[in-house]
Amino acid sequence: MTTTKTRARTYKYSHTIGIDDFAGRAFRNSADLAIGPEGMLYVLQRGTPLHRNVSVKICNLKEEFFGDFGAYGTDPGQWTWPAAIVLDSQGHLFVSDEWTNRISRFDTKGAFLGEWGDAGSGPGQLNRPSGLALDGQENLLVVDACNHRVQKFSREGKHLGGWGSHGAGPGQFNMPWGVAVNPAGEVYITDWRNDRVQKFTSQGRFLLEWGASGSGDGQFNRPAGIALDREGDVYVVDWHNNRVQVFDPQGGFITQLRGDATLSTWGEQLLAANPEMMAGRKVAKDLSAEKQFWVPRGIRVDDQNHIVVVDSGKGRLQIYQKVPG
Amino acid sequence: MTVTSTKDISLMAHLMRRAGFGASRDELEAAAAKGYEATVEELLNPGDETYLNKDIVDRYYIDVDDMRASDAANAWWFYRMINTRSPLQEKMTMFWHGLFATAYEKIQNGRATSGQIEMFRRNCLGNFRTLLLELSRDPAMILWLDNNTNHKGAPNENWGRELLELFAMGVGNYTEDDVKNCARAFTGWTIANHVPRYPWGAYPMEFEYRPADHDDDEKTFLGRVGRFNGEDIIDIVVEHEATGRFVARKLYQFFVSDDPAPDAAIETLAAAYAQSGHDMRAVMRVLLNSDFFKQAQFAKVKSPAELVAGIIRLVGDYREPKPGLVEITWESKFMGQELLNPPTVEGWHTGKEWIDSGALVGRVNFASDQVGNVEQPGIQAIVRRLSAPGKPLSPQALVDGCLDLMGPLDVTADTHKALVVHASQGGVARCGTTKEKEQFARRVAEMLQLIVATREFQFA
């Protein structure tokens, strides 16, 4: 278990949740997650083309598993390429779908409550929507990736505005991915193909940017999910650098997380029930590669500063805890 | 305006079918304008491939990003075949994959099998020595032919035997003692003790050389004596005169004809192999510019993967990530060729063995479904060409126009007559009014569906 102390902040690795498998109490190709009260986790699964097993897996930080819901397809309430998930204060889950260009709404038991979204580039239309976040008024910010913009909607789908165009200048985007909003309503967006993060006022006025292509501190190889902690520090999933970078609210580099995975309870139980799997582990001389993130995609931080990383390529969540000092 | 003859277009279409997966008429005309030899040079020198936008592919195909399963590895390869601007690179990669057949069924690691394909792609037009050396160190191959159990004092001959028999020389050119000593030379060539696959899935594998497990004693191999290691074996093998002929025969079978290779062609290619210092680009330059290649039009049955990739390129689908790509790759599997998962170390049995009643129905149904969709950009391009003169087409002109744009494809008189009889049922094809244009497009698509069901279309 690692602990990182830097700039008056301490990041402690906590534990890992999950095993890699197609069905049941396992994850496969997770895209994002939402965190609910009391550590409830709603983990969005892109699944595999073979099994068409898109779903939301429901569990909690204590590794208890409560089931799943979701169906593959293009009919109302179905998903084809689900990309992001967010939970509002009413207990409604919103899911974006990059293929159907819809935002669908469910309760936390999986009951379908409605959806909106049309393909296109006009106001309120969507072209491969990805990241989702709620602002202080619980309006929904939707990263409209292939229209290179962010759009704001009411929870019922009324279009309220947006900003952005294709390009690399301030306020422009190249296939943005993730979005996060601070209590002041300021918006952070991972500008995926420009390898940078941009920060805006709640009305979309450009404030600042940071990042460049590369693998050094503050550089990115396609930043994906983004989240903020209680103090406003910014966590960016640096997708193809297989890491999470942490920044202060102005974009100053704090540290990076590379992954510290340890066997999850689900994993321990799987191995205990399958001696031949355990045998493979016993002969392995070096398991250090197992710890590292593998094409992570999403990240969320709860109100207790639990940092939950969606370690997509390995069917698991890695959890850290930020503490003062 | 560049005037190109039907003969030029036919020859260019032949080149692009064999050295690639076919080409649209626009592409054929552009290539013909450059000239045959210049086009061959372009094919032999793959360029930058940033246009494939692998990051975007990974973003939307989350399983390709992860690359643990064979489906994902297969999907990425088909995506490349469909979208590549360097089709010979993919065709050569497919050639080496068929020759050095390694199956996911045993490896069970998508990154290892796709890593081997990437290695073939990297070396496909390079030096044969480099390719064999990398193959000897390829983790998927080591696992596939058990060289990880080839130990000093307890050799496993599997890799050593297949290197000589199936991969580089062919039976009759070495002895059993050569096999034994070849295997001894490769002791200690193994895979690093890799991370277990449970509970989080397979990890990439890496080559490891363990000197303590290598038999460093003297060996006799193909008449030479020394304390040979694997590199020495590769050096001796690539220099052997049987190897040049072996590679030549395999290339001829894959790129030229399903019929046995004539001696003269083998000697020509083997000479290019020797004179170039085993440079595959030089050998392929000779092959693609040879008369025996140019004269072998429609002398090969298309493999399922060629057929599927060719049809998708023709209709212009999957030019960017969209759902359904894995299902497209399954079509090839259902027709008898699951890439990355050949049936045995001998690879696939090709030629007429691709065709049985089930596979033929699968080929025709797949192709027919695809070309029958008038919404596809490639089909619309064919419709535009046929309607461009703005004049009504007689049934025979409709048939001939479609056959021309689907090849040009020559069919037997009986087939041609049957196509014209069918076209005649609709009378003259007009494209004046909006309704006529819709009917015209539907009739073209219907004719294309009949053409892909002909015997002749099964050949490349």
Image: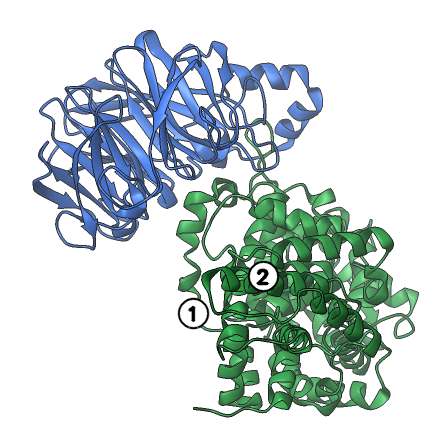
Q: Image quadrant for the N terminus of chain B?
A: bottom left
User: The chain shown in green is which?
Assistant: B
Q: Nearer the viewer, mark 1 or mark 2?
A: 1
Is residue A88 in view from this perspective? yes
The amino acid type, in three-letter code, at marker 1 is Asp
Residue at image mark 2: B119
Q: Are marks 1 and 2 in contact (CB under 8 Å)?
A: no
Q: Is residue B247 above or below residue A62?
A: below
**To which quarter of the image does residue A122 belong?**
top left
Give the percent coordinates (x, y) of residue B212: 67, 51
Give the percent coordinates (x, y) of residue A268: 56, 16
Q: Nearer the viewer, residue B249 or B379?
A: B379
Chain identifier of the residue bearing label 2 in the image = B
- Indicate the secondary structure of the residue bearing disc 1: loop
Q: Is residue B365 above or below residue B126?
A: above
Which residue is at the far top?
A: A38
The amino acid type, in three-letter code, at marker 2 is Met
Count of marks overlaid on the render: 2
- Tell me what residue is drawn at x 55 percent, y 78 percent: B43
Residue B48: which disc?
1
